[in-house]
């Protein structure tokens, strides 16, 4: 057994590997017999990718994979809803304008971050257009591109905060709240099972528009992720809990409301948590409440899933 095959098989759950490992190895040997290194590597990567899907529950038959497929048009829309628009007092517009004016003449240390910022202003629109036209393969590739651009932007932010007094974690998390939605939203869309993403014409376009409207609404509610608009009171709690509660519908196989929650959570989680962090005065003070809410939601999901199984025919 080759190193590539052993590595790929290691990503599969142990039980599946015991039951089907030999069969997979035989098929892999047949498919790659006489093939070049590039073809063999591609087959090994495909095998490894499916192993990761099984590990994470994102196969086409698993609940997570089906939820991502239903939510893909909404995710495409919410990424557009994040767009930086003029005349709204959005501080992100000043950053985009600065990056556009600098262009390729920006200092070498700023160039990658500026290009990533400009890319995040354009690529989500291309992604939504691809999704609206039914080109889901292109949309998934663009989703991965959005996540990569966001990762580059985060790295640029982190590098720019290194000073004589050390690295400023508060400023990093503050600036990261505007980038994390792109990172998570793009990655989720890219992870949707390709075999479930079939063009549905008008239905997809309506969901994309709904996602864009919802994304724009929550982005404006958060003031464009500006620290001048850090939320007080129960508003950040609501923006954090509403998507999480919507996702509980997945436990009863009601995937559309759950998909809406999944699409909105990347937009609200980071900024809401940061606002709550500021309210309570530190992460450690916030942690007990966050753990309690997480435990409550997990218990609710288990109870709902148990209720669905007990009510199923023949059970």
Image (cartoon, rainbow, N blue to C red):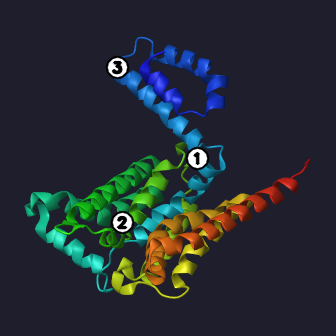
CA separation, marks 2 and 3? 38 Å
Quarter occupied by residue 96: bottom left
Instruction: Identify the disc placed on residue 271.
Output: none
214 is higher (above) or lower (below) than 103: below
Q: Give the residue at x 65% y 46%.
A: 62
| Residue 12 position in % (x across, y down) | 57, 33
- Mark 3 highlights which residue? 37
Comes first in the chain, label 1 or label 3: 3
User: What residue is at 66 percent from the left and 30 percent from the top?
Assistant: 15
Q: Nearer the viewer, mark 1 or mark 2?
A: 2
Query: At numbered mark 3, what does the secondary structure look like: helix, strand or loop?
Result: helix
| Residue that carries the numbered disc 1 in the rendered image | 196
Q: CA distance from mark 1 to mark 2?
A: 28 Å
Within 10 angstroms of label 1, few (less than 14), some, or many (20 or more) residues? some
Q: Position of residue 126 (x, y in %)?
A: 36, 59
Q: Secondary structure at mark 1?
A: helix
Comparing labels 1 and 3, the label whose residue is closer to the camera? 3
- Closest to the observer: 232 or 168? 168
**Residue 266 point in image, percent of width and height:** 48, 65
> Label 2: few (<14), some or many (≥20) within 10 Å?
many
Which of 60 and 269 lies nearest the eye of the viewer? 269
Which circle marks residue 179 in the picture? Answer: 2
Residue 140 against residue 278 in the figure, above or below: above
Crowding around mark 3 (Cα neighbors within 10 Å: few <14, some 14 to 19, many 20+) is: few
Residue 185, quarter of picture: bottom left
């Amino acid at each position: 057994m080759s190193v590539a095959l052993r590595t790929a098989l290691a990503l599969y759950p142990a039980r599946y590997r015991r039951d089907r490992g030999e069969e997979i190895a035989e098929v892999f040997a047949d498919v790659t017999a006489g093939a070049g290194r590039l073809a063999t590597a591609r087959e090994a990567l495909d095998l490894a990718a499916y192993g990761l899907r099984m590990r994470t529950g994102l196969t086409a038959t698993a609940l997570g994979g089906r939820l991502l497929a239903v939510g893909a048009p909404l995710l495409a829309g919410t990424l557009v809803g994040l767009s930086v628009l003029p005349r709204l007092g959005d501080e992100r517009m000043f950053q985009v304008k600065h990056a556009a004016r600098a262009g390729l003449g920006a200092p070498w240390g700023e160039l990658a971050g500026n290009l990533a910022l400009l890319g995040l202003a354009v690529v989500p629109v291309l992604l939504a257009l691809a999704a609206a036209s039914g080109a889901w393969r292109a949309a998934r590739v663009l989703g991965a591109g959005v996540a990569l651009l966001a990762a580059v932007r985060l790295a640029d932010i982190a590098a720019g905060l290194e000073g004589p007094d050390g690295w400023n974690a508060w400023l990093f998390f503050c600036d990261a709240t505007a980038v994390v939605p792109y990172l998570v939203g793009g990655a989720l869309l890219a992870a949707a099972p390709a075999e479930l993403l079939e063009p549905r014409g008008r239905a997809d376009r309506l969901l994309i528009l709904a996602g864009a409207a919802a994304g724009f609404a929550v982005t404006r509610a958060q003031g464009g992720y500006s620290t001048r608009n850090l939320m007080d009171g129960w508003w950040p709690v609501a923006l954090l809990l509403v998507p999480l509660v919507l996702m509980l519908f997945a436990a009863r196989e009601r995937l559309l409301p759950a998909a809406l929650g999944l699409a909105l959570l990347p937009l609200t989680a980071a900024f809401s948590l940061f606002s709550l962090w500021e309210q309570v005065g530190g992460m450690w003070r916030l942690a007990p409440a966050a753990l309690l809410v997480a435990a409550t939601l997990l218990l609710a999901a288990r109870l709902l899933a148990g209720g669905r199984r007990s009510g199923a025919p023949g059970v």
